[in-house]
Image: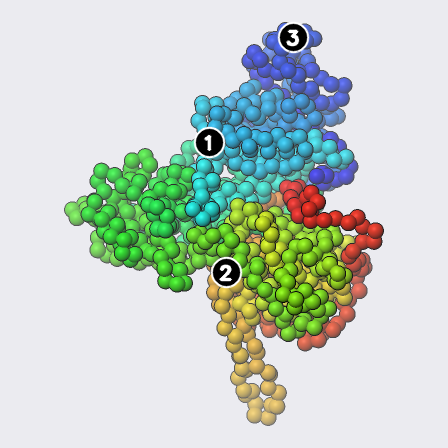
Amino acid sequence: MESSSSKDQRLSIDVFEPSVSRSVGMSAVTVNEGNYVQVLPGQGENSGNQIDNKWMAFKFDGSAKKRTSMEFDVAEKSAANNPAGDEEVSKNSLERLSVGSTGLAESSVGSGFPRVSQEIKDALATLKQTFVVSDATKPDCPIVYASSGFFTMTGYSSQEVIGRNCRFMQGPDTDQTEVDKIRNAARTGTSYCGRLLNYKKDGTPFWNLLTITPIKDDKGRTVKFIGMQVEVSKYTEGVNDKALRPNGLPKSLIRYDARQKEEALGSIIEVVQTLKHPKSRLTSQNHDTMAKFEHHKLNLENILPASTELDGKGVLGSQTPQQDSRSKLPHSGSRSDTTNKSRKSGRISLIGFKSRSGRNDGLSAHQEVIEPEILMTKNLERKDSWEKAERERDIRQGIDLATTLERIEKNFVITDPRLPDNPIIFASDSFLELTEYAREEILGRNCRFLQGPDTDQATVSKIRDAIREQKEVTVQLINYTKSGKKFWNLFHLQPMRDQKGELQYFIGVQLDGSGYVEPLKNRLSEGMEQHGAKLVKATAENVDEAVRELPDANLRPEDLWAIHSQPVFPKPHKRDTIEWAAIRKITETGEKIGLDHFKPIRPLGCGDTGSVHLVELRGSGQLFAMKAMEKSIMMDRNKVHRACIEREIIALLDHPFLPTLYTSFQTPTHVCLITDFFPGGELFALLDKQPSKIFKEDSARFYAAEVVIGLEYLHCLGIIYRDLKPENILLQKDGHAVLADFDLSFKTACKPQVIKHPPPKKRRSRSQPPPIFFAEPNTQSNSFVGTEEYIAPEIITGSGHSSAIDWWTLGILLYEMLYGRTPFRGKNRQKTFANILHKDLTFPSSIPVSLAARQLIHALLNRDPASRLGSTSGANEIKEHPFFHGINWPLIRCMSPPPLDAPIQLIGKEQNAKDINWTDDGVLVHPMELF
């Protein structure tokens, strides 16, 4: 893709800093006429143009001291030493990465070696990710920069890495299919994200999640590749990702690679931005250093959850030392701490932002009462999250980091008794920590591998009997970790049954009670056993409830998509539209509608699992939008249940501010939804077209009001939307708004209520307020879903969320419409999440916004869900806010939208457009680039 500025020059980071002595066979090099160092095939030490006492054609002083290796040189640099101020990042920041850039190419004393500028080194040294940078302009894409973490992870030194292609990490069991994908990405200048087996210098194999993204110049030419590595050996399913059940579905209940890839894509953005804008990176780092004590006050290192265990202090529910590693906040792309035996995956750092006690302590603190006349207007510095150059307006994809099941931070496994030997199909991360096994070593095995010499076989027999009789049991027994260490396991087995009452899974919960064993009795005390039994049974109940969100792993593949083949019937309010008339003309003949009934016109957009197309119903001239989702991708990314929930939800809708489902169907490769086509496009695009990237208050009020009504209707149906953002608000031909895209939504029960006001105290009073209709979903979920900048605090902390998260996102939306940015966006995902949890809400004084609007935003962005506006009586209290005075709620759909500086430009069928067919190459496949 293009770089952030159309005038950015070619990027080149040539960091060749070898030691004096180089290995025979390393590539010899020469210098091109330009600013780039050319790597040539090695021909021995005296080959070519006599480069004795030279390296890369730069003269070398043989008496100079041996240079420090690059990994040490890079690691010792600190952003705090950089004197850069807050001046604007140069539009030619990419050019500064070239060795030959004026004023930035430095030479060490007594030598002519090229060195990257100090600014670039300082900026790159602040990154925690493990990555390399390769030069795409040179043959074989040699590595020109490697982070210190790369050397630590692989065991190689700089002189063994710099100037070489990354293939030296391959080995006998490296999947050549993945290698071919990498080569194709390098050849075509595209992105890649995949897992392959690599080898360290000492020959140790490890699973490497490799993410590659190209850096391109203003002409679209690929000039660099960034390759980020994350070792995922402990948490990936490894070779088990190809293990299938007899029904053809994966044995593993969750596809872990999808989770790791989502993390990696979020993490590599920071590397890209640092390479493009090093000064902004250093400026933000300096600001973070100055605010160090404030960060300690916020206690950012203590917001991850701890598993409920038995500790040595006689207190149930506090954490064991083994869980201390969770209290850190590692970057999702950072290398593992090799000194910490209980390291956690990068994934956990984003799906478990909780306080140590498991409560949302920071959110339930007393909220400071702010007087209306002093509501937080502030002259803001234009620093990291505010600077456009720091993070360009990118495609904000909804993220699906974890299901509720994955966020249960307890030691447990799920087994499937319908498969031979009752194998494990799910193991929690906490279980991996407790037992020291990697997930690859556990999936597909029976739990008996935890037994050892001192395991009581009589107790094991009780467990076997419970399995055979399909009943629950709680026992104590000695189990063993992978290293052979004993632990006293309070184990609870609980069967899980489907809606028909048939056995579906077994849930096995472990509680480490080693610190409570009474020496004489050689078992837990009666009191501790009873208390521990309550904990493990409660965990099993939570697991039972969470796993029901997922499709039954024993279903046939065709059963998973059956809902998409069900007929769709018109709802009362739109049954007489011309769109339904065109659909009925086909269905009334008994014909089933399929892909061939629609003619593709043009693509409307694409996401990570599918694409949206403008289509025409053949023979009718009617236009529709078709969302096509690829089945295999949905399977690989744990999104089958999301697709089915979206189909179920859209079929229920009958509202002017929500889409209508006309039909759905499936092909051998895709499932498709046919809905309304909205020619006004996205609200995000309309907002971006405005001269100042903001709406006037009248327009913001109008769109926010229609969103409130749409959310109110969804909540009445028991639907929590969970992904409100301008990209998901579409505009009808008349300018009215529609909420779209329900793949991250949650459907639960809802109990409508009518709340009557108490009678007036004064007898003579004739005014009696009408009763309030209140209907909000009454079940909580704990999935980690949403869009990064819009995610509510309770989703991050994992404390469970309800419909109140939609009112939080309404506050973010209103802020973005009025101020042109979201209030908590940081330079990366981790920073954004930390801001959401702790950063003060401020309103830039440079943009005039009414007091009522600021008050509404402040009330909606209350970190305590129970105190958030909308939590007490739903949409009613939001509608009554002074900001919405003047809105005629019952007749708002008859209003004309307020005029805009840049009016809506309708899209549709283009004249003289080239005809395309579904069979044409790539029509249904629009893979999304990382950048």
Tag 3: amino acid: Ser
Horizontal and vertical percent for residue 624? 70, 60
Mark 2 lies on a secondary structure that is loop
First in sequence, mark 3 or 2: give its number: 3
First in sequence, mark 3 or 1: give its number: 3
Q: Is residue 416 left or right of residue 625?
A: left
Outermost residue on the bottom side: it is 764
Residue 900 position (above or below residue 611): below
- Residue at coordinates 77% horizontally, 49% vertically from top-left? 915
Mark 1 lies on a secondary structure that is strand
Quick one: 694 or 427, which is closer to the camera? 427
Label 1 Cα crowd, 10 Å radius (few <14 / some 14-19 / many 20+): some
Q: Quadrant of the N terminus?
A: top right
Q: Which residue is mark 2?
A: 801
Quick one: 661 or 764, which is closer to the camera? 661
Between the residue at mark 3 and the residue at mark 1, the CA separation in whole angstroms equals 37 Å
Mark 3 lies on a secondary structure that is loop
- Residue at coordinates 69% horizontally, 46% vertically from top-left? 919
Q: Which residue is mark 3?
A: 47
Horizontal and vertical percent for residue 147? 56, 29
